[in-house]
Image (spheres, helix red, strand yellow):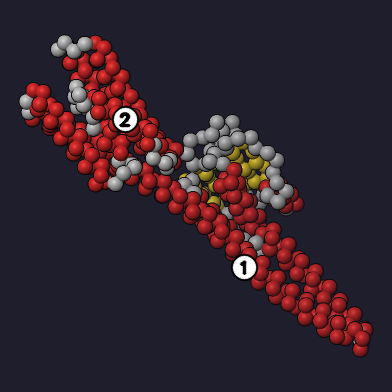
């Protein structure tokens, strides 16, 4: 089962609070009970009660469609409108304002308020014709109409703000990852650009010398070979560790990326006494662990602790079975750590989280 995200919880809060607003329409059942005590036939009361429940349920369904960004549900609006018109005969004051509120997500604000005002005028006209003007009925209907017609659009507006904020956080996280990739690409371009330019120049010189002085051309090709080997070593060093990774910079970058992705991150690092090679290896493991948190989990909390050469990185976002470590990810890093005399293990925990532990000799 997929774990609920913060966006899911925010959506539930908005939807259920709107359901409470629409539930005010169920007060019409109380009014129907009062009418029953005044001699209205039970059959009419039962039919009106069914219409009250229908209007409330349809309104709740319509708001859920609005939250999802679905097209306007014309059929639901028509059904609710007909039911509301029938309830106006009694009239059921708590339920009638629901229909104008249902229109709020789909029509312009001015149109919705005109419909709401028209419903108040129509119902009050029926009440006045049937038994005379009642100020209490007018006040009750006006208050309920204003509460529903204003409350539903506010909740929908709040949901849109929450969703845009969430999308902005995801964009910030993606941007941070993209900036890190661009930085690596610039480093690799600077390194290979200079090396390959030198190799091309030496190879061109050897080609020109080949006929006139084969021995000089051969010496030049040996230089080309040495340059190629040196470039290969530099590329491998760059790919493995982004040259010399700074642990403090990586930790700061990791925290920023995780918090941009709405993952609360706590860092406790005491690694000043460690040798540079160990700090670089720790930085590479932290960075790869962070990538896994962002790509393979729905974490809300992440803790990174580095003390006495021991790295512990935990998060609470495991959402499914965990496979083998990729050779170009934690699998490859585990081999590098073993080559440096340390150990690297990672896997799910009993409480539904994930833990990465690296131990290096001090």
Q: Image check: 46 left or right of 349?
A: left
Mark 2 or mark 1, which is nearer the start of the sequence?
2
Q: Image check: 89 left or right of 228?
A: left
From what the image shows, is residue 77 above or below residue 132? below
In-front residue for pair 89/185 = 89
Q: Does residue 109 appear in the picture of this structure?
A: yes
Q: Residues within 10 Å of mark 1 (few under 14, many from 20)?
A: few
Tell me residue 49's x, y (percent): 28, 18
Q: Residues within 10 Å of mark 2 (few under 14, many from 20)?
A: many
Tell me residue 102's x, y (percent): 31, 36
Mark 1 and mark 2: Cα distance apart in space: 61 Å
The kind of secondary structure element at disc 1 is helix
Q: Image check: 213 left or right of 182?
A: right
Quadrant for residue 106, please give it: top left
Q: Image check: 36 left or right of 252?
A: left
In-front residue for pair 184/253 = 184
Residue under the point 78% across and 76% down? 199
Quarter the N terminus occupies: top right
From what the image shows, is residue 316 above or below residue 339? above
Residue under the point 21% across and 18% down? 32
Q: Which residue is mark 2?
A: 80
- Asked if the residue under mark 2 is in contact with the one under mark 1, i.e. CB atoms within 8 Å, the reply is no
In-front residue for pair 101/337 = 101
Quadrant for residue 28, please give it: top left
Mark number, residue 186: 1
Mark number, residue 234: none
């Amino acid at each position: 089962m997929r774990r609920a995200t913060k966006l899911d919880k925010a959506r539930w809060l908005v939807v259920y609070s709107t359901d409470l607003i629409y539930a005010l329409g169920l007060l019409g059942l109380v009014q129907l009970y009062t009418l029953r005590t005044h001699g209205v036939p039970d059959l009419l009361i039962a039919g009106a009660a069914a219409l009250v429940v229908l209007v409330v349920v349809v309104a709740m369904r319509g708001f859920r469609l609005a939250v999802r960004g679905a097209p306007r549900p014309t059929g639901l609006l028509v059904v609710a409108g007909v039911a509301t018109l029938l309830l106006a005969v009694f009239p059921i004051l708590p339920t009638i304002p629901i229909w104008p509120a249902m229109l709020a997500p789909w029509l312009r604000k001015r149109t919705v308020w005109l419909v709401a005002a028209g419903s108040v005028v129509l119902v009050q006209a029926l009440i006045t014709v049937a038994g005379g003007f009642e100020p209490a009925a007018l006040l009750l209907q006006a208050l309920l109409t204003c509460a529903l017609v204003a409350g539903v659009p506010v909740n929908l507006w709040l949901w849109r703000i929450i969703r845009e904020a969430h999308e902005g956080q995801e964009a910030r996280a993606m941007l941070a990852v993209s900036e890190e990739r661009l930085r690596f690409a610039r480093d690799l371009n600077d390194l290979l650009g200079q090396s390959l330019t030198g190799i091309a120049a030496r190879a061109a010189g050897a080609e020109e010398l080949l006929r006139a002085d084969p021995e000089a051309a051969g010496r030049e090709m040996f230089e080309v070979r040495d340059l190629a080997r040196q470039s290969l070593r530099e590329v491998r060093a760059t790919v493995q560790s982004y040259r010399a990774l700074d642990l403090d910079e990586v930790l700061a970058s990791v925290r920023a990326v995780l918090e941009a992705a709405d993952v609360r991150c706590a860092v406790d690092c005491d690694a000043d006494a460690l040798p540079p090679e160990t700090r670089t290896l720790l930085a590479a493991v932290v960075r790869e662990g962070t990538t896994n948190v962002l790509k393979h989990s729905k974490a809300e909390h992440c803790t990174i602790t580095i003390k006495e050469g021991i790295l512990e990185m935990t998060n609470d976002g495991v959402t499914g079975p965990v496979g083998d470590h990729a050779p170009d990810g934690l699998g490859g890093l585990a081999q590098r750590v073993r080559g440096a005399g340390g150990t690297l293990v990672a896997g799910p925990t009993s409480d539904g989280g994930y833990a990465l532990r690296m131990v290096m000799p001090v």
